Image (cartoon, helix red, strand yellow):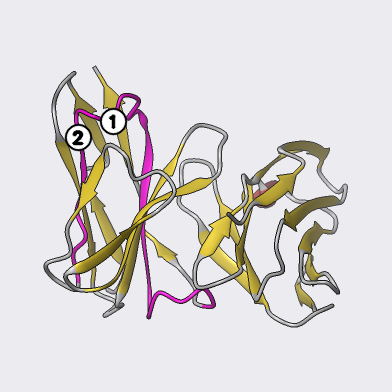
Amino acid sequence: DGGITQSPKYLFRKEGQNVTLSCEQNLNHDAMYWYRQDPGQGLRLIYYSQIVNDFQKGDIAEGYSVSREKKESFPLTVTSAQKNPTAFYLCASSIEGKGKETQYFGPGTRLLVL
Amino acid sequence: GQQVMQIPQYQHVQEGEDFTTYCNSSTTLSNIQWYKQRPGGHPVFLIQLVKSGEVKKQKRLTFQFGEAKKNSSLHITATQTTDVGTYFCGGNAGNMLTFGGGTRLMVKP
């Protein structure tokens, strides 16, 4: 069964804590993306990667970090420097990372700050 | 940088009424995509428009791409409760999609 999986579904973060959100895909896509969605808001790009061991900052990268050590995995770390992390985080992938491709989204992770 | 604006932000309709959401870009686009996100769900691809003035239909949904390739619209005829959700446009002016803020559609039965 092909697709994108994200875990956990819900995540709670304490003040000053780093947390990592998982994103895995078995679609054999080169490109992967992380978006942040706030209530009633659109999708804002945090980071994207078009190839293994390479990634680029999106519009709101401050306070976040990523790695792309494997083609199928693109974890996102929300660091303590991100002062307002409560949001819905969506991971997506596409074949090559060019703007004419369909993006396939995972089910998302809701991050809440305690 | 490129900006993509969507209006309206919210729309309440009675079941059976029509609905339209509009997407406007600050720059000329190579292509535009539309996605639907059901409440509590994730965005799902609906369609892509590439040509100037292009019109595509999917059952009750009609998608248009403006002649100048800077705006687009999604029109739903005779809405149903299954149409509920947020509709996003994503415009590509280089090599990356920039999403609009979305239009949340609510349908009263």
Prevailing SS of the magenta stretch = loop
Q: Nearer the viewer, residue A61 or A2?
A: A61
Q: Is residue B32 above or below residue A20?
A: below
Q: Nearer the viewer, residue A1 or A47?
A: A47
List x then y, in percent, for residue A55. Answer: 27, 64
Q: Residue furthest front?
A: B1
Side of B16 where B88 appears, left or right: left
Query: The numbered mark 1 sits on a residue in which chain?
Result: A
| Disc 2, SS | loop
Residue at (26% x, 53% y) in the render: A6
Q: Is residue B8 above or below residue A13?
A: below
Residue at (51% x, 61% y) in the render: B44
Q: Which quadrant: the C terminus of chain A?
A: top left
Q: Quadrant of residue B55?
A: bottom right
Q: Nearer the viewer, residue B10 or A50?
A: A50
Magenta stretch holds residue A75: yes
Camera sees residue A17: yes
Q: Which mark is residue A82?
A: 1
| Disc 1, SS | loop
- Distance from disc 1 to disc 2, alpha carbons, whole Å, reads 6 Å
Q: Nearer the viewer, residue B59 or A84?
A: A84
Magenta stretch holds residue A67: no
Side of A113 where A43 appears, left or right: right
Q: Which mark is residue A79?
A: 2
List x then y, in percent, for residue B31. Answer: 65, 74
Q: Which residues are magenta?
A: A72-100
Query: The numbered mark 2 sits on a residue in which chain?
Result: A
Q: Are marks 1 and 2 in contact (CB under 8 Å)?
A: yes
Amino acid under disc 1: Gln
List x then y, in percent, for residue A87. Answer: 38, 33
Q: Quadrant of residue A17?
A: top left
List x then y, in percent, for residue A23. Answer: 23, 57
